Image (cartoon, rainbow, N blue to C red):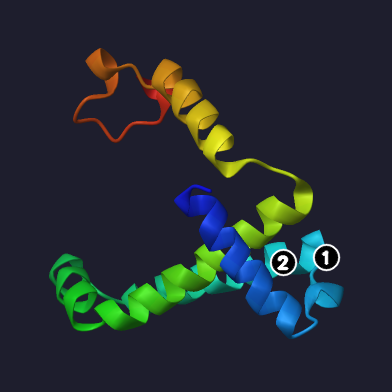
Amino acid sequence: MNELERLTADVLHFRDERDWKQFHNPKDVALSLLLEAGEVLEIFQWKDAAGVAETAQARKDDLADELADVLCYTLLMAHDLGIDLSAALAAKLRKNALKYPVDKARGSSSKYTGL
């Protein structure tokens, strides 16, 4: 069992002990994922560049909690929908490599359509 599978098993065990699967349809898990991602963003809200760096250090534990929540819902959704996240990430990186070739994208924040 790889690390991603172990983490998924841990999340499923936590959920199943509490009988929460009944509440976890794809729409509500996606909504929860978005809400938790919003909580990550909220930590940085109204901060300038210096404030973002300072906040990232000062609120590292809060960020870790929120990122863990995002990962938790991501793992649940992938499991429930039969998506192999390792394979999905590898495929997405291959797609992005084609859209953002190093010789054109290096050091640029432009979208692939502008390269």
Q: Which residue in the structure is indicated by mark 1?
A: 25
Residue 47 sits in which quadrant? Answer: bottom left
The residue lying at 51 percent from left, 52 percent from top is 4
Question: Dots 1 and 2: beta carbons under 8 Å?
Answer: yes
Looking at the image, residue 19 sits to the left or right of residue 3; the answer is right
For the C terminus, the quadrant is top left
Does any portion of residue 113 appear in the rendered image? Answer: no
**Amino acid identity at mark 2:** Val
* Residue neighbourhood size for the residue with mark 1, other residues' Cα within 10 Å, grouped as few (<14), some (14–19), many (≥20): few
Q: Which mark is residue 53?
A: none
Q: Which mark is residue 29?
A: 2
| Image coordinates for residue 80, horizontal then vertical, percent | 76, 55
**Amino acid identity at mark 1:** Asn
How many numbered marks does the figure carry? 2
Does any portion of residue 52 appear in the rendered image? Answer: yes
Whole-number angstrom distance, CA of label 1 to CA of label 2: 6 Å
| Image coordinates for residue 51, horizontal then vertical, percent | 18, 75
The residue lying at 74 percent from left, 86 percent from top is 18
The residue lying at 13 percent from left, 70 percent from top is 50
53 or 57, nearer to the observer: 57
- Above or below residue 65? Residue 105 is above
